[in-house]
Image: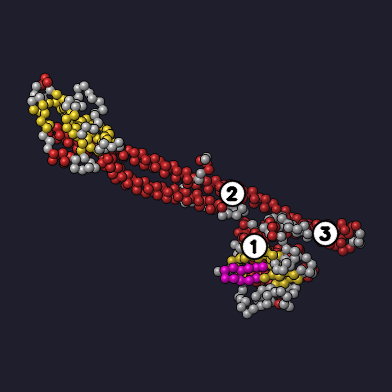
Amino acid sequence: MSPSRFSLKRQLLLWLLLPQVVLWLAGAVFSYRLAGRYANEAVDATLLQATRSLARQVKPMGNGLLIDFPRAAQDVLEADPSDKLLYTVSSPPGQFILGNRNLPSPPAMPASPPLGQAQFYDGEIEADGARAVSPVRVAALYLQFGENPRAQQTMLVQVARSSANRELLARRLLIDTMLPLSVLIVLMSMIVWAGVGAGLAPIARLRRLVEGRKPNDLRPIELDAAPQELRSLAQAINDLLEAVSHNVEGQRRFISDAAHQLRTPLAGLKSQSELALAEAPPGPLTMRLARVHEGASRSAHLVNQLLALARTEPESLQRQTPVRFDLGRLAREVTAELVPRALQQNVDLGYDGPDSDPDCAGASQLEERPGDAPPTDDAPERPVEIVGIPLLLREALVNLVDNALRYAGRGARVTVQVHGASDHAELVVTDNGPGVPEALREQVFERFFRATHEGNGCGLGLAIVKEIVERHGGRIALSAARPRGLRVSIRLPLAA
């Protein structure tokens, strides 16, 4: 697997912890060999002492040997079955005199062996006649005896001890050495793990700062507490954001200026086409004038939507101060303002809230509508207050009602409602028109997307509404109304 597919944290931990594991294994091997060496030295010292003691029990007498080795001394040497001493005396070397016949001979029988110097080596011996063999550590000592210096003979004294206790001692030394080292390695690994996590925390914060942003949020990234390397990265990102912001601001300013410049001539064209339609006799010219008037109206609507969209941008919002106001009153006022237009289009528009005022309710709020929920005594009477920019929320509500009037159809019913909950306010616009298919309910919030080709909309209304709602910390959702139609719900946080 390529290293680039690993995370940075995983790579750092790999390069920091893997050497510790390798060093720990190397330390274990070195410690085991060192412990074996020390164990051999301890065992060799014991064997040397036993070899010299045994050699002193073999005394030369004339040209022969006097062996003074009582049975009690033999029992002492063989008292411990698991760690008994085995011995052999041979003279000349290889000719058995006393002890165990199975002891292994020295690795090499020199022609002139070093006299009085012990030789230590490892060997194997059969266990009590069985086929199994056990490792032993052997000490061999060459001595000379005889009264005639010219006719002295060589005697070999060997003492062996099982290697099991030596290996046990080596293992104990290894455990006593490696146990604290292992604890130290674990503690170091935990410190390295925590250190890597703390060192990479600024990268995680930078990632969250970038991931949590909206596409149109081009504010610089603040990462003052980060290391120098990340500050350089943040500065590079900020330079890029600044360049993009200047570019976007130039395009936005161009669109706003162009919309302002087009607004007056389009309004004049729309007025002149209306006058021409009123005065022109029926005929082909009237049809052409009607198309010109429709195009002028649609262009004027597009220009107004572009200006409204420009007012929802962050730069425009910074110049507007949020205030505390009653969302229900704003909804009643907007509904009352749009009632004449609804009457022209034969649409039943009304406001239905807990504190509805018949004088400003709308087209048909004087009588109770069938299917509407009857008022209850439990409905809250206090205002539904939020903190925001009334002009923008008015624009959002106008766009919602405008969409409903355009697409619900003649004879439809449009209702505006405001409710206050424990932690949020809800503004709902419901109509009983054809609605929006469920598959398109997310796409309709995209700019210039139209779910239908009917009407003369430009596909910016719901995009503007979503921008305004999100700028106020709220959310918007579309759902099907019952028994038919569309329900648009906006949730905004209540004022503290």
Disc 1 secondary structure class: strand
Residue 114 seen in the current view: no
Which numbered dot is residue 476? 1
Local crowd size for mark 3, using a 10 Å CA cut-off: few (<14), some (14–19), many (≥20): many
Q: Where residue 141 sits in the image (x, y, percent)?
A: 18, 30
Residue that badge 2 annotates = 241
Residue 420 colored in magenta in the image: yes
Q: In the image shown, does 334 or 213 lie closer to the viewer?
A: 213
Which residues, given as a range, are shown in magenta?
A: 418-428
Label 3 vs label 1: CA separation? 34 Å
Local crowd size for mark 1, using a 10 Å CA cut-off: few (<14), some (14–19), many (≥20): some
Q: Is residue 338 left or right of residue 319?
A: right
Question: Which amino acid type is shown beneath numbered disc 1?
Answer: Ile
Tell me which residue sits at (10%, 28%) in the image.
60
3 or 2: tag closer to the N-terminus: 2
Which numbered dot is residue 293? 3
Majority secondary structure of the magenta segment?
Answer: strand
Q: Is residue 488 left or right of residue 40?
A: right
Question: Which amino acid type is shown beneath numbered disc 2?
Answer: Leu
